[in-house]
Image: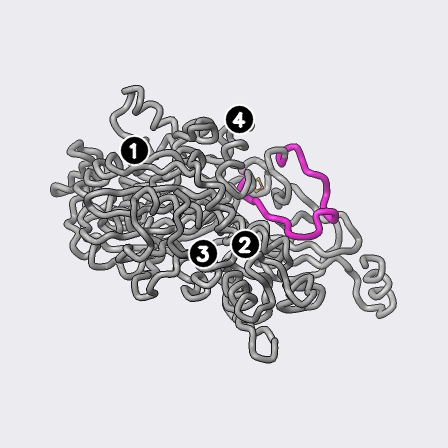
Amino acid sequence: MISMRVRMCISIGRMIFSVELHFNNQQTNVKPGLSLFEYAEALGIRVPTSCHKQGKCRECLVEIKEGMQCLSDPAPQEEHLNDGFRLSCRCRIIADAGVVRCHTMRRGDMRIESRALQLSAHQQSLQLDPAVTRDGDRIFLDGEEIERTDGPIHGLAMDLGTTTIVVRLLNLETGEIVADAAFENPQRFGGSEVMSRIHYDTTHGGKLLQRTLAGYLSHAIEEFPVDSNSIYEMVVAGNSTMRDLFFRLSVYSIGQNPYQSITELELADGRRTTTSLTESAKRLLLPLHPKARVYGLPIISGHVGADAAACMLAVDIANEERLIAIMDIGTNTELIVGNKQKILAASCPAGPAFEGGNISCGMPGLPGAIERVKINADGKIDCRVIGGGNPEGICGSGLIDLLSELLRNARMNSLGRFENGETRIDLHTNGARQIYLNEKDINELAQAKGANVAGLHIVLDEYGIGFDEIEVFYLAGGFGRHLNVEAAKRIGLIPNIDSTKILQVGNASIEGACMALLSRAKRLELENLVKRVQHCRLETHPGFFDYFVEGCQFNPVETLSLM
Ligand code: FES
């Protein structure tokens, strides 16, 4: 194919270069020799950097989706990167012909949920009571004077996900949101899910994951429209692994049975009184006020982390009379069921398939992603693309629609096998780029779904209730916000309950982090609440395998007891 392209260039006698570079979806023809960073500059694409192409900061990370063979061998500064990732200042195009597709860690236009919906009642009743206070020009943190200024007082809240990160800047005297930022977690070079990151961090020295993230975060903070010296506190929500990596703790124990954070182990030993964390911003390499503090929300247990805790705060479960469920679908799906009397929680190792990971044409919910799919009566497939135009891939909500439509039209059976002799479903052809789904992809999605369904069944069994007894079912997270509820029910990703009970609330975790930032009372409430949550350990549950196998099938999820 490459030689054909070369011949074609010669025959038409006008093209000089035959390497096509697609960088952040911008296309250019290139000649060998320059680095990807230099081409990005020529295209006007901003690449994160603190060392200006010196190979020192490790921030100019790009993911190579196609054409790795066209690039120079990895430089010594790239030894820490897993397959598919390069430092753009260190890799050069060396081929005479070919296609290279790459992108920086996405920022801004990625469809990451940074606001929660339908939760405003809880937030409006919040009494402002931050840890940072003012008396005249004297600024205090927990009663200790840390600054003298007439300027504003700001704080940061962060939802630190395995795949995506949302940071919100708030005015601590008014509670107003000043700005927010969202970007892909640049730690993806160490693996797409938590176990890979744990393995990476344990086998590579130098806290590379934390330092890389701190670099990206610093750029985001410096772009906020306030003096970063006016930021005095930051509150962090994240799963147990992401949170502990951020605080530069060893995460080894989270990867080993019984899968506990070092903070849990120290709590059990009597060496600490809470699983929450406090650290100076300086030690975490963040450009905040020199005396700023970073507070990591408490984790619940095992992989049920501070993000799940933040969701509990956002939906006010501590004061809830009704029986509610919270499901935050992600690389690790968090499940919480209960009310003010009793709460159970679990974490399901779903993997990245519903975020586009490990799927042939999968991608995150970015412009260019197919987000809606409909199969018409004549069999023609209609797709809606985020931002319009030609699709580049398909994201989680599009995958759910597609599976649901294939089932509805009897083109796929409940075992995830194509009917009618098809071997793959073609959605779109865009030049050489084809967007399709095959049975291997469906198998990945089935397994991700199976883990979520097993979690649902086990938590409800342990609680002693059926799905119909849930009065409100909160679907949290960016993916949960955008999925088609009826399609998700048809394929059995969420329970087959009355749709009026299902609330798609977006990023509840960042809302909980904001509440903890603005209110010491809420922070204390959460510290006490996490101690009352019972953790259902799916990995050791005797029914997990049977429920998982059941959940891998594309059938509606109904109450079903194997006990
Ligand atoms: S720009 Fe700093 S490592 Fe490439």
Horizontal side of 282 relative to 147 (left or right) equals: right
Q: Which residue is mark 4?
A: 205
Q: Residue at x 62, y 59 (%)?
A: 417
User: Could you classify mark 3 by the number of other residues whose Cα lies within 10 Å: few (under 14), some (14-19), or many (20 or more)?
Assistant: many
> Which label lies toward us, 4 or 1?
1
Question: Which quadrant of the structure image shows residue 111?
Answer: bottom left
| Mark 3 CB lies closer than 8 A to ligand 1 | no
Residue ID at (84%, 70%): 12
- The magenta stretch spans residue 70: yes
Is 18 left or right of 219, judged from the image as shown?
Answer: right
**Vertical position of residue 436 compared to residue 271: above or below:** below
Q: Which residue is mark 2?
A: 356
Q: Earlier in the sequence, mark 2 or mark 3?
A: 2
Image coordinates for residue 115, horizontal then vertical, percent: 33, 57
Instruction: Report the magenta residues as a range.
Output: 58-78
Q: Kindly check if marks 2 and 3 are in contact, taking CB atoms under 8 A apart as contact.
A: no
Disc 1, SS: loop
For label 1, the residue is 276
Q: Nearer the viewer, residue 555 or 334?
A: 555
Disc marking residue 493 = 3
Quadrant into which the N terminus falls: bottom right
| Camera-nearest label, 2 or 4 | 2
| Mark 2 crowd level (few <14, some 14–19, many ≥20, 10 Å Cα) | many
How far apart marks 2 and 4 lie (CA) works out to 30 Å
Colouring mode (rainbow / by chain / secondary structure / one colour): one colour
Give x and y (percent) for residue 62. Answer: 59, 47
CA gap, disc 4 and disc 1: 25 Å
The alpha-carbon separation of the residues under discs 2 and 3 comes to: 16 Å
